[in-house]
Image (cartoon, grey):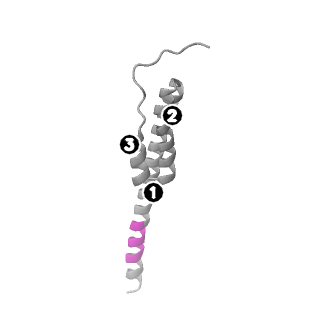
Amino acid sequence: MERIDKPQDPPPNYLVWAILTTIFCCLPFGIVSIVFAAQVNSKWQAEDYDGAMNSSKNAKIWAWVSFAVAIGGFIIWSLLAVLGVVAGFWADAINW
């Protein structure tokens, strides 16, 4: 088995981003991001550089998924609220 040279710097773990998206965005996907973020440093210490890079990449992807789901949910909620207001005005106009 070939020995891989240690890269200079460890990959970013995105732990802060993962925690923030868990708290403010989408809880289930944020937790997945936290799990991957927590694996980065331990894999780096165990000299599993490819594993650390993959965990870093997955932590970033799941943080973005959590953020996107939250934004999508907010947009849908906003549209439903606007449609509810419009329907209320329309219903009041018909009853006159």
Determine whether 90 is above or below 40 in the image: below
Magenta highlight range? 81-89
The amino acid pointed to by label 2 is Ser
For this rendering, which residue is in front, 63 or 96? 63
**Residue 11 screen position, x and y as percent:** 43, 28
Q: In which quarter of the image is the N terminus?
A: top right
The residue lying at 43 percent from left, 35 percent from top is: 13
Secondary structure of residue under mark 1: helix
| Prevailing secondary structure of the magenta residues | helix
Task: Identify which residue is drawn at 43% across, 62% down.
Answer: 77
Does 95 sit above or below residue 74? below
Q: Mark 1 points at which residue?
A: 73
Q: Can residue 82 be seen in this view?
A: yes
Disc 1 marks a residue whose amino acid type is: Gly
Q: Find out whether residue 86 is within the magenta segment.
A: yes
Q: Is residue 71 visible?
A: no
Secondary structure of the residue carrying numbered label 2: helix
Q: In this view, does 48 lie to the left or right of 84?
A: right
Q: Label 3 amino acid?
A: Val
Query: x and y percent of residue 60 in the render?
Result: 45, 38
Q: Name the residue under label 3.
A: 16
- The C terminus - image quarter: bottom left
Instruction: Quote the CA–CA distance across marks 1 and 2.
Output: 27 Å
Q: Which residue is drawn at the image coordinates 51% and 42% (left, top)? A: 35
Q: Is residue 36 magenta?
A: no
Q: Nearer the viewer, mark 3 or mark 1?
A: 3
**Depth check, front residue: 94 or 60:** 60
Q: Measured from the top left, where is residue 65 in percent x and y?
A: 48, 45
Q: Which residue lies furthest to the bottom in this view?
A: 96
Q: Name the residue under label 2.
A: 55
| Labels 1 and 2: the sequence-earlier one | 2
| Percent coordinates x, y for residue 61 in the rendering | 48, 39
